[in-house]
Amino acid sequence: MSAERILVCDDEPHILHVVSAKLRHANFEVLTAADGAEGLEIAQAEIPDLVVTDYQMPLLSGLELCAKMRADSRTSHIPAIMLTARGFSLNEQELGRTNIKKVLVKPFSPREVLSTVRQVIEGAGNPVASDLSAGV
Amino acid sequence: MTQTQIKPWSQVDDDVVGGDAPSATNAAPRAERSAPGPYRAPNVVAGGARAYMTRLRAVHAVAPLIVAACWLLLGIAFGFWSEGFSRMAQLGMFTLNGLAIAIVLFSWRARKDRITELRTALDRIGRERAEVAPPPSIDEELKQVWSAVEQHATSLSGQLQRIRSDQKQMELALSLSGVQKQQAEAVLRAISDPVLVTDAYDQLVQANPAAEELFGIKGDQSTRVPVSEIINDEKIVAAIRDSREAEVRVAKRRIELDIGDRVFAMTLSPIGSQTSGGMGGVESHGVVCLMRDITKDRLAARMKSEFVAQVAHELRTPLSSIRAYVEMLVDGEANDEKTRNEYYGIIDASADRLGRLIDNMLNISRIEAGTVRISKEAVSLSIVAKEACDLMRPAAEEKNITLTEELTPTMYQVMADRDLIYQAILNLLSNAVKYTPGGGSVQLRMLPLDVNKSIRIEVTDTGLGIPKEDLPRMFQKFFRVEANKQLAKGTGLGLNLVKQIVETVHGGELTLTSEVGKGSTFGIVLPLATENAKG
């Protein structure tokens, strides 16, 4: 299971860097974007297999990015994992408009990100519904 | 005789003059034993002094006449039936008759005089309420009448005094309760929060002007109308009803209401009094509803919660980096020395950033609480400004922003806390770089003012600019320009900290001019240190 393309979206260069490094070391092909708008652009152009995105980003938030991807027929099938430093959970309604399969809370563990990425890619199409509102 | 029938003695006398003589014969006093009728003790207090006097006087007026008439008729009859008696005997009889009549008349006259004296004396008691001695002429029987009347008069006088004192107290209480009512109404009117008062039937008794305005109650509507007809909010009506009907009436209840775009906390206090039945029973007279506008409290709470969330986010970001890179190192994901050194550097920088964030927040909090430790010394502003520019230069270059500085000679010094002033200048520069799109410019300029009495540091950018309506709120804590939020992250604390440092700590002035699409200029004006101050 290699060469799946994963788009990582975060406005924090260090986070972007570390997540990309972890995934690359695990033989994933990684695309990066520094804000939501750029992320949407790359997603629509490259059609990655999975998106890992931050929640709070300039221009377009992670939630808006995922909602726009879901609404676009080209990208509507792409699952997403959200990393958030927000102090409260995302509501079901907001998540329902997206393809977000899992929410990880910052500070996160790169190991956990990798295992979640694998889990989502293996079970693509089966939403990890019980984990959706896990954001703290 | 009830209290309301009390009359002055003189009036009693008048009544007696026109009194009903016939009934008097049925209740003759001991003074006239010859008259028929049952004996009644002269307990005038029980029977009433007035009635007794009426009877007494009537008997005195009529009884002697009846006796005289009887004697006369007896004499004539005797003369008529005793034809056989001699003329001498008849003459003797008539003489005796005449004599008897004269005696009776004399006795009647004397008695009448004594009663008149008694009446006059009693009148004096009534009129003057004085200690009056009984007339010496009256006999033992009338003396008893006298003492009974005197006793009754004393009792009546006491009653009268008590009634007068009660009346005075009631008048006083009445005027006092009028004043208290006026005061209570004035207090109610003066309360700026809406207040409603309802009665035992949930009818509106009173509404102060604030409540009238809130519920659109017209002045003429505001009394004794069911509250449900005036207030179109079932929650309030139900709360009033529940509060009134509740078992434990001493307890206040509090509900929160959204009315229009305002939020109110409504406190309902039942008006109750202990029932005479005891056992803690309480009778309900109604409910007082006091409403407090908590819109601002809610807003403050929301802002605080948003701030905490923002701060948590800001703190978690560098913490995430630290945790993630440490884990990478532990997991051996950094294969070569160069990568390891890169990771160490990132961890170090993130820890620094975390520290700065915490410092920023603590500084604001300390300045606000007045507990910040300030060490003022003569500081050369040019040096501090240069350091701040140097620190910001990499970030500016990364965004392709030209950062220029125009500094005054280092001899221009201010009495300042070096670290805090550095922080203020850095915050202005950092904001300028953050909110200026790539390719723009940021300029730091210093110029002496007021014939070298103060100095001005200006940070001008070619950034997004601030909408006019947002200018007054720019230095408020947590405030961020909505339109510019997308461009950069922030806690909404930076400018507030600058203002606190410049104005609260250093007694300077922070200025701002801005135009949307063209850019902004922030200015710090500080008094220059005098030679004496430099020590």
Image: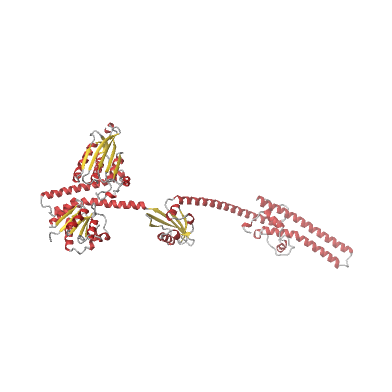
Q: Position of residue A13 (x, y in %)?
A: 18, 50
Q: Position of residue B326 (x, y in %)?
A: 16, 52
Residue closest to the eye, B498 or B442: B442
Residue closest to the eye, B233 or B69: B233
Query: What colour scheme was applied to this rendering of the protein?
Result: secondary structure
Q: Position of residue A59 (x, y in %)?
A: 24, 52
Q: Position of residue B154 (x, y in %)?
A: 63, 54
Q: Quadrant of residue B144?
A: bottom right
In the figure, B185 relative to B524: above or below?
A: below
In the displayed structure, does residue A81 sit left or right of residue B185? left
Image label count: 0
Q: Quadrant of residue B415?
A: top left
Q: Quadrant of residue B86?
A: bottom right
Answer yes or no: is residue B323 visible. no
Outermost residue, left side: B336
- The N terminus of chain B sits in image quarter: bottom right
Residue closest to the eye, B496 or A76: A76
